[in-house]
């Protein structure tokens, strides 16, 4: 099973960071990385089953939402290249926030099955890194 893992410390209180990132349909904090978020269906962004399409390419569904523990997970159902429906199976991404002395530790991880796990990691890790950098710059 392949895995990706990225983390960053955001110098903001955990509740402030959670409020910014917890709505599955709102990625305004990811300016410069996410150019479009299309809500699919009627389920709201804090509810399991919410669907979105990012940058007209990544089809994702919220599969777990834990407001108390500041964590959500999602499934990528289709996407470009190494995360396409045919190339990867069981792709689960997890965003976890933890309070630390510097503010908030944000961990973004994923697991998946693929015949080319390293290609998936090489594709996804820079995206997660860019998202986390945008989070640190844009949440204030």
Image (cartoon, rainbow, N blue to C red):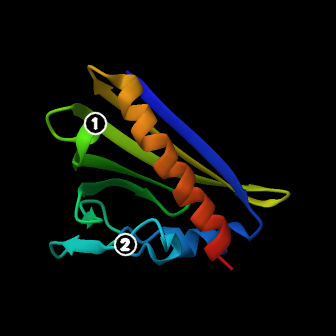
Query: Tag 2's secondary structure?
Result: loop
Q: Quadrant of residue 60?
A: bottom left
Query: Tag 1's secondary structure?
Result: helix
Report the residue at 35% width, 41% height from top. 92
Report the residue at 50% width, 46% height from top. 126
Residue placed most toward the observer, 56 or 38: 56
Residue 139, visible in the rendered structure:
yes
Residue placed most toward the observer, 18 or 91: 91
Report the residue at 29% width, 47% height from top. 75
Binning the other alpha carbons within 10 Å of mark 1 as few (below 14), some (14 to 19) or many (20 upward) gives many
As drawn, 65 above or below 82? below
Q: Say which residue label 1 marks.
A: 82
* Real-space CA distance between mark 2 and mark 1, rounded to the nearest whole angstrom: 20 Å
Residue 45 at x, y percent in the picture: 34, 71
For residue 20, which numbered disc appears in the image?
Answer: none
Q: Say which residue label 2 marks.
A: 35
The C terminus appears in which quarter of the rendering? bottom right
Residue placed most toward the observer, 70 or 53: 53
Residue 119 at x, y percent in the picture: 37, 29
């Amino acid at each position: 099973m392949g895995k990706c893992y990225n983390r960053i410390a955001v110098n903001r209180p955990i509740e402030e960071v959670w409020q910014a990132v917890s709505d599955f349909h709102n990625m305004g904090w990811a300016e410069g990385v996410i150019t479009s978020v299309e809500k699919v269906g009627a389920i709201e962004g804090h509810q399991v089953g919410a669907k979105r399409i990012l940058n007209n390419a990544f089809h994702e569904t919220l599969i777990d939402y834990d407001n108390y523990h500041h964590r959500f997970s999602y499934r990528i159902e289709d996407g470009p290249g190494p995360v396409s429906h045919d190339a990867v199976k069981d792709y689960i991404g997890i965003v976890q926030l933890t309070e630390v002395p510097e503010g908030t530790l944000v961990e973004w991880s994923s697991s998946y099955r693929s015949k080319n796990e390293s290609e998936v990691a090489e594709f996804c890790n820079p995206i997660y890194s860019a998202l986390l950098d945008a989070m640190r710059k844009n949440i204030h």
